[in-house]
């Protein structure tokens, strides 16, 4: 996987994760372009599209778009599953997650993503073990105190 | 300095934290850029502070701003600085800051100079989550230099004790390999090890990495194929499976042998996918899906897989009565296309679909007939496969359709010729038969056409064609073909004769096959109205008399009793006769090598006996109250009704007798002393029990069918006898006694004239397994099953069942309702229908019998009005209602008696004329006792109450003046458990 973006229907970026080093300028350009493409699509249209030399897999949950860019030879369906699994994880962690959860606790969302995916590859397919790791880390964080 | 620190921490209180920042940005929608620039200024200030917490806070905010698209590379140094802190949280936020965002050049310099030691230090941190964060961070910004420097460290981590670290290390190795391919060779053995890691997370990570690597260079990974094959067949993790299958996709071109091995596991997976299609199809996409499947059919190599696809196509199309098919021409063409499949085993399936569609969809017949004619014409192409259910089966359908709907044929003559080709004789018999029959139909059609054109010669030629060709079929080895062919051959010869006389025959020949064959729905019979004057319920012959029908019922105990009470002398013979038979049976058993004899040790037999009995009895007890009315239940109601009628008849006769007996019972009871326990202990005479037991068990099995209506019907003397003293309240207070009369009562429906509603009440315990096993004290609940039968001609509804609670027994009502509220009966009763409802009662003391008064209110709906009616009834809870059949070993029984904790009383009954074993069976059956042992006409029995009381019972026959009497000894131990 090249990168993952979460953005709202209004075109606000909520979360981004890049698994390959990309220059800041290029990133911005790609994000902007991709958001335009995805947001313009109708609800009944396919979740997969080819974009530049990548395949884009996206899915909309409520007002939030989850969008992944994968390489040509990657499987779109499993990418869709990855997205869904990530949403399930968020949902489990936050308890019926909503966009605001991700806005205000975006570092948690990042952390969940990091525990689930690493370097663009699935790290652990078990929801339980991912959530356990996050729980442990939360505990650790509480012990060491918040920076704010 | 100190002042500065203090000042710093005070400042901190006013600092924005991340939450504030997010909120602030949301509140400044109009001038977001301006707001953020002030924030960035603040952050810059914060970063200058010495307090690491402040800095970390600033960095956190930067991560958010960075995500929003603001450049934060100016803070790179500070970020690395915070990251180097020892606190976990700071590191988390920093790693999230995605250092990758920083200029590539900067990364190299900064990381190599500053953070490399930090990262390596983290890597060896004792805390797995520290290490984890380091690895996660690293995964985002691995550079060739970093990869080179860290490869060996990460390799070590791959063998870390914590699976959490292992899996991260495995994954990050992928990035390292990409950036620094030289590391692959030394790391590969270890990576391979991880494929068999005990932790599924690590395993799937390893599979992931290897699959990704293999995609780039499959050749190097061929050696892993067996390992992956094993994983694929054993793993249940779909994620892993998908990756492995993709890997095999890359490997198979390099190793053709792999393909064969993969067929089975892969087809299994494909089947699962195909199953999904069922749910996916709709009218819109059906054609497209089938088109795709057809492509796969063409491409498929294995016949099994192809057949699977074929059946799936047909299943999908035909599901719910062709619900999704909008164009049947399309479907027929699909079916015809499918006939091109060689070697399929589903020719029959295709054929039946063709027939089904052609028959049911009238509009499609013209098209179908044309297609089928083509098929017949090209029949030789399909006859290559002669095996049963081969594709040649479709010719069966084709021939029938062409024959039956021959009026739609464009060129019937050509089709007729095609059906009479000599090659047809090689087809399976049943297909030939259809050919012959339908050739005749076609012949009729052809004749009519030809005679219409007044070309009589052509018609005669057609007849000649049949006469020439049919003998081939007459010689067939298949009977049906032969029969049809010779019959039709003679017919055609006759027709030919007529033709030669210039007689027009077409009309008559067509009449042979006139009328349309219509499909019949499976349930069509129901729609046929019953003709007037036909009463399906009326007996064709006189029904057998009711007493006879009783005899036929497999109720051994009651059956045997029936003749007895008509011919009482039977009882006299009984004991001697029984003993004699028993002896004979023993002899026979001894001589029978296949008979498994009981052990000579009576003790042992006893242990076996209750042991064997124990299991079924407990199960049956359980099943009774929980039994959902199933098929046998309806029989039960029927029986109930029969017996109720019979009872009414016989009751009148018996009344007198009963009264007498009751007097006797009462009189005897007073002077009969308690029986001594020694009576039970002596000789352990076992054989009878082993003989009788099956009968008792059998009765218990029959339990669900019993209805207590039977008791009054039959001459159940002891029952009536014991009951009366109880009802008279004859000094029972201290020594509760197992009451003979069983619970139920038939309600005196003296009430409403209009209503002959009968209420059958049956009591059952709530036998729950754990109650029986230990927690008997909680089992103070009784389930009363009530069978309501509507004997009126009107509809009954809104039935409410209510019982006046006593101190001791209370009807369990739903929470929140008052103790006077009735319980709604959860059904309505159309005329003549009966149904069963259960009510739960809680009982406090079970040592006294109970009579509860109750009322059933209901609404009777007549055609023009509905009236509210009421029916009073009484519920009898006798002490034996609370007993649970519990087997007891004879030694335990003896101990119980020896313990002296049992209180006892006894009573004598006269006029009992049933055989002793019947009596025992009855006691067992109706009063939930089990026989501990039996010696001739003396038996000790045991039962246990739901609250754990032991009840021992000795039944003896005292032969004075040849009148069998009963002596009762019963004891109840007030259990203190």
Image (cartoon, coloured by chain):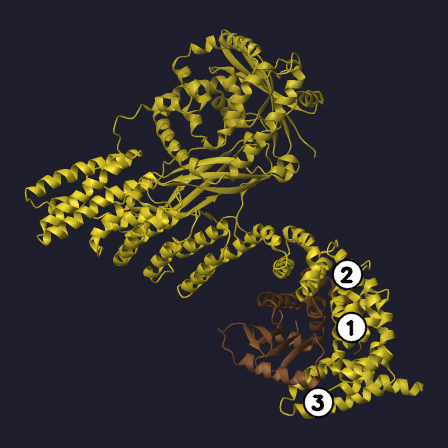
Q: Do labels 3 and 1 share a chain?
A: yes
**The quadrant where residue B570 appears:** top left
Between discs 3 and 1, the one toward the N terminus: 3
Say whether residue A91 is left or right of residue B430: right
Of badges 2 and 1, the one in the foreground is: 2
Please tell me whether residue B266 is drawn above or below residue B687 in the rendered image: below
Say whether residue B938 is left or right of residue B720: right
> What residue is disc 1 on?
B138
Q: Which chain carries label 3?
A: B
Q: Which chain carries label 2?
A: B
For label 1, count other residues whose C-alpha is less than 10 Å away and answer few (under 14), some (14-19) or many (20+): many
Q: Which of B560 and B390 is in front in this view?
A: B390
Q: Which chain carries label 1?
A: B
Chain identifier of the brown chain:
A
Visible residue check, residue B740? no
Alpha-carbon span between mark 2 and mark 1: 20 Å
> What residue is disc 3 on?
B36
């Amino acid at each position: 996987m090249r990168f993952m973006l979460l953005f709202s229907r209004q075109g606000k970026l909520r979360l981004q994760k890049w698994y390959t080093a990309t220059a800041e300028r290029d990133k911005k350009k790609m994000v902007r372009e991709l958001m335009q493409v995805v947001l313009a699509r109708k609800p009944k249209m396919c979740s997969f599209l080819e974009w530049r030399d990548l395949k884009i897999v996206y899915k909309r949950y409520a007002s939030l778009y989850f969008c992944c860019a994968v390489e040509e030879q990657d499987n779109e369906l499993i990418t869709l599953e990855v997205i869904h699994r990530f949403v399930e994880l968020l949902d489990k962690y936050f308890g019926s997650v909503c966009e605001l959860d991700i806005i205000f606790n975006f570092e948690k969302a990042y952390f969940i993503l990091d525990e689930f995916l690493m370097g663009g590859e699935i790290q652990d397919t078990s929801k339980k073990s991912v959530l356990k790791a996050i729980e442990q880390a939360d505990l650790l964080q509480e012990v060491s105190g918040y920076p704010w | 300095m100190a002042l500065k620190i203090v000042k710093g921490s005070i400042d901190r209180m006013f600092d924005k934290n991340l939450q504030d920042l997010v909120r602030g940005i949301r509140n400044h929608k109009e001038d977001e850029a301006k707001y953020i620039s002030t924030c960035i200024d603040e952050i810059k200030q914060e970063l200058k502070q010495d307090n690491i917490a402040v800095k970390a806070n600033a960095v956190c905010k930067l991560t958010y701003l960075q995500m929003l698209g603001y450049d934060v590379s100016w803070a790179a140094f500070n970020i690395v600085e915070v990251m180097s802190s020892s606190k976990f949280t700071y590191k988390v936020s920093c790693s999230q800051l995605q250092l990758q965002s920083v200029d590539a050049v900067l990364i190299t310099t900064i990381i190599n100079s500053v953070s490399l030691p930090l990262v390596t230090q983290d890597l060896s941190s004792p805390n797995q989550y520290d290490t984890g964060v380091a690895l996660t961070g690293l995964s985002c910004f691995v550079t060739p230099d970093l990869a080179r420097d860290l490869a060996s460290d990460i390799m070590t981590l791959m063998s870390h004790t914590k699976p959490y670290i292992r899996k991260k290390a495995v994954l990050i190795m992928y990035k390292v390999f990409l950036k620094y391919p030289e590391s692959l060779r030394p790391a590969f053995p270890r990576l391979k090890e991880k494929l068999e890691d005990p932790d599924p997370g690590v395993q799937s990570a390893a599979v992931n990495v290897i699959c990704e690597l293999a995609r780039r260079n499959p050749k190097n990974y061929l050696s892993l194929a067996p390992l992956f094959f094993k994983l694929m067949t054993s793993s249940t993790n779909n994620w892993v499976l998908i990756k492995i299958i993709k890997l095999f996709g890359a490997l198979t071109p390099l190793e053709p042998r792999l393909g064969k091995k993969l067929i089975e596991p892969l087809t299994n997976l494909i089947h699962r996918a195909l199953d999904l299609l069922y749910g996916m199809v709709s009218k819109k996409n059906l054609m497209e899906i089938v088109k795709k499947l057809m492509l796969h059919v063409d491409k498929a190599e294995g016949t099994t897989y192809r057949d699977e696809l074929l059946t799936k196509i047909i299943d999908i199309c035909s599901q719910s009565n062709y619900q999704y098919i909008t164009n049947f021409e399309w479907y027929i063409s699909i079916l015809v296309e499918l006939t091109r499949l060689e070697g399929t085993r589903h020719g029959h399936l295709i054929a039946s679909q063709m027939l089904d569609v052609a028959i049911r969809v009238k509009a499609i017949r013209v098209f179908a007939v044309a297609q089928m004619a083509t098929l017949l014409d090209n029949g030789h192409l399909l006859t290559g496969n002669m095996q049963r259910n081969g594709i040649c089966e479709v010719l069966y359908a084709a021939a029938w359709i062409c024959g039956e709907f021959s009026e739609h044929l464009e060129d019937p003559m050509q089709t007729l010729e095609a059906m009479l080709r000599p090659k047809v004789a090689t087809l399976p018999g049943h297909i030939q038969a259809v050919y012959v029959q339908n050739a005749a139909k076609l012949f009729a059609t052809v004749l009519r056409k030809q005679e219409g054109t007044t070309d009589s010669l052509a018609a005669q030629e057609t007849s000649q064609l049949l006469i020439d060709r049919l003998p081939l079929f007459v010689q067939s080895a298949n009977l049906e073909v032969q029969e049809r062919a010779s019959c039709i051959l003679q017919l055609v010869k006759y027709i030919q004769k007529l033709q030669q006389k210039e007689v027009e025959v077409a009309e008559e020949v067509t009449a042979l096959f006139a009328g349309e064959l219509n499909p019949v729905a499976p349930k069509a019979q129901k729609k046929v109205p019953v003709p007037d004057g036909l009463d399906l319920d009326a007996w064709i012959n006189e029904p057998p008399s009711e007493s006879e029908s009783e005899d036929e019922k497999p109720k051994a105990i009651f059956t045997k009793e029936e003749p007895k009470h008509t011919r009482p002398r039977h009882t006299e013979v009984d004991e001697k006769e029984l003993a004699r038979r028993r002896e004979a049976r023993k002899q026979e058993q001894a001589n029978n090598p296949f008979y498994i004899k009981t052990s000579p040790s009576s003790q042992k037999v006893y242990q076996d006996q209750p042991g064997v009995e124990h299991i079924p009895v407990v199960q049956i007890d359980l099943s009774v109250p929980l039994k959902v009315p199933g098929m046998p239940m309806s029989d039960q109601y029927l029986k109930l009704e029969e017996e109720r009628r019979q009872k009414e008849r016989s009751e009148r006769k018996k009344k007198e007798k009963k009264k007498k007996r009751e007097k006797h019972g009462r009189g005897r009871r007073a002077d009969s002393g308690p029986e001594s326990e020694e009576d039970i202990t002596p000789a352990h005479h076992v054989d009878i029990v082993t003989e009788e037991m099956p009968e008792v068990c059998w009765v218990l099995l029959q339990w669900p069918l019993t209805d207590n209506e039977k008791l009054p019907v039959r001459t159940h003397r002891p029952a009536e006898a014991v009951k009366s003293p109880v009802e008279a309240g004859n000094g029972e207070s201290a020594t509760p006694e197992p009451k003979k009369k069983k619970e139920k009562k038939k309600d005196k429906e003296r009430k409403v004239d209009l209503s002959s509603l009968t209420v059958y009440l049956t009591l059952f315990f709530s036998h729950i397994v754990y109650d029986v096993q230990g927690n008997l004290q909680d089992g103070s609940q009784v389930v009363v099953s009530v069978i309501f039968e509507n004997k009126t001609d009107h509809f009954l509804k809104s039935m409410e069942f209510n019982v006046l609670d006593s101190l001791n027994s209370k009807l369990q009502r739903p929470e929140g309702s008052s103790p006077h509220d009735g319980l709604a009966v959860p059904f309505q009763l159309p005329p003549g229908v009966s149904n069963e409802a259960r009510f739960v009662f809680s009982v406090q003391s079970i040592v006294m019998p109970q009579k509860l008064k109750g009322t059933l209110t209901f609404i009777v709906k007549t055609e023009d009005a509905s009236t509210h009616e009421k029916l009073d009834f009484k519920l009898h809870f006798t002490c034996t209602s609370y007993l649970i059949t519990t087997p007891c070993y004879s030694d335990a029984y003896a101990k119980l008696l020896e313990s002296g904790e049992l209180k006892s009383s006894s009573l004598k009954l006269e006029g009992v004329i049933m055989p002793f074993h019947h009596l025992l069976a009855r006691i067992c059956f109706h009063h939930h006792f089990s026989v501990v042992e039996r010696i001739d006409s003396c038996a000790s029995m045991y039962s246990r109450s739901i609250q754990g009381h032991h009840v021992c019972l000795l039944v003896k026959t005292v032969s004075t003046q040849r009148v069998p009497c009963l002596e009762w000894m019963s004891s109840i131990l007030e259990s203190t458990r």
